[in-house]
Amino acid sequence: MVVKQVGAQATIQDAGRFGHLRLGFAEGGVTDPWSTKLANLLVHNSPDAAIVEIALGGLVLEAHLDGCIALTGACCDLFINEAPVTMASRHAVRAGDCIKIGRCHQGVYSYLAISGGIDSPPVLGSRSTVLREHIGGISGHSLRVDDHIPIGKRSVRSSGEAGISGPIEQAYLQKNHSHLTLRVLPGFDYQEIYPTAVSELLGSEFTVTGASNRMAIQLAGPAIHTGIVEAWSEGTCYGCVQIPGDGQPLVLLNDRQTMGGYPKFGAVNPYDCVRLAQARPGCTVRFESVSLEQAERLQWLETHYQDALLRSLGVA
Amino acid sequence: MQFTHSPAGTDGLNFRLEGCPGPDMTSRLLALDNYLRDHPDLAIKDTVIGYRSLVVFFCPVSTNRAMLLQLATSFDPEPSAKTPAGNLIRLPVWYSPESGPDLIEAATLCRLSIEELISAHTSPTYNAAATGFAPGFCYLGKTPDSLTLPRLETPRRLVAAGSVAVADNQTAVYPTASPGGWRLLGRCPTPLMCMDWPTPVKIQVGDRVQFFSISREEFIDMGGAP
């Protein structure tokens, strides 16, 4: 595949770079693992094969091999040789074909799977691009015009396992959210934050701002004054709610820095984080505090719900 | 070991020790880190050592949170059989206004001559307390009391790789070019990070670091590009 045009940002991602936080390497990885899994299964790849993550639409590629593609995630116009085709379906492409991902109508991140998977050189066991660290993907940068995206020769998925024969119904796709409830498991500094600040955090509505990216979702709302003067830098986690001096909370995502020195309230449920990452600026959110047991149960339910959806699509 | 703990998500635990951050606290955190990561009954995915805390991420399927907590609580590091002492790393630094654009202002702020400032920065053996901000960026403490500097009000968009910097009573070397708000005193010509090394970063938590002053010529001889 050769890149002909790019929009806001398109990066190569896989499940992420794990086990190197201790050396300061961010995890990276796809923002929306469910959409990634669906796209890969549609083209009979392994569910976590490397894929193109496109922010807010806009990418034109020229195929150099025969194969197939599928696009999932944020809803975009999709064309093959100028003819409109559907998202969440497998489409055959031939060498020379032009694949165009046009305008993005809702959501933020779309996923283009290519049969065979992307075969860019792994760095510390992952192909995920972390732009801030200049590693992964193609020489550590987002896709640029004339980049050649290397594609794996054979299907990554071992024979005998079927993918999704597709197309996928709307019910399986990422929804558009104008309001979200973020279930947050308190941790880190939660016991040291002023009780009034905790009630304000849990009782107020916040809005997703345009300053959000793969590192964090920036929220705007009433300023939360934690009362914590001295916070020592320590490890962060996915979904970490960090409250800097201006009192506007951040929810940390895949490309977050491995350590943070701002007061932290806890961690948002990972599935809620994905919905949040897919939300456009202006989406309103509220935090809801959950116990450890509730948080574990939520994750169990979401995981099993997704497994059940996959089974109903014919994937074991 | 005595600590407070809280969840870091459903697959993480944050252990915090009481007391003041410093070499002693770092070695206690490292001892707990080594113990948990090497324990045969635990599946630890990753850990992050901070100034006074250890965040542990575990595989929730094969590792039980309660057992992890119980093992950490009962762990008692013997003072004699301490964690393997980290490496002693000696780093050359070309201190100059050319390689360290904040050197002169830093000396003025600290009311030191340039020579005194260099001598203050090269005198301690620093404790590598935490890695963060960027891969291989290790927070080294503490600088002498005479050499404490506020961060820049407006961070630089681009700091050269190898830049040696101070903020508050911490010092560090930027392993790669990046934005940065610390005060730059000079540059180190030897690489701090290389993705081809078995461990891609030079300084890790627990290491001890010393700086020594070199000339512009030595900087170039050692492979530095002024």
Image (tube, rainbow, N blue to C red):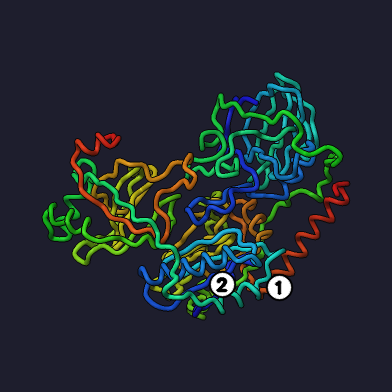
Chain letter of disc 1 in the image = A
Nearest the eye: A253 or B126? B126
* Among the 4 quarters of the image, the one containing residue A205: bottom right
Image coordinates of residue B31 in percent, x first then y, are 48, 68
Residue A86, picture quadrant: top right
Question: Label 1 is placed on what type of residue?
Answer: Gln
Residue displayed at 38% across by 58% down: B207
Q: Quadrant for residue B23, please give it.
A: bottom left
Task: Name the foreground residue: B45 vs B96.
Answer: B45
Q: Is residue B99 among what the camera can see?
A: yes
Residue identifier under label 1: A294
The residues tagged by marks 1 and 2 sit, at their Cα atoms, a distance apart of 14 Å
Which residue shows up at 78% across the image and 40% down it? Answer: A88
- Label 1 secondary element: helix
Q: Residue at x 88, y 51 (%)?
A: A312
Amino acid type shown at disc 2: Gly
**Label 2 crowd (10 A; few <14 / some 14-19 / many >=20):** many
Q: From the viewer's perspective, is residue B23 above or below residue A42?
A: below
- Mark 1 nearby-residue class (10 Å; few <14, some 14–19, many ≥20): few
Residue A13 horizontal/vertical position (percent): 62, 42
User: In what element is the residue under mark 2?
Assistant: loop
Would residue A10 appear left or right of A74 to someone viewing this image?
A: left
Q: Mark 2 points at which residue?
A: A187
Give me the residue at 56% from left, 74% from top.
B72
Disc 2: host chain = A
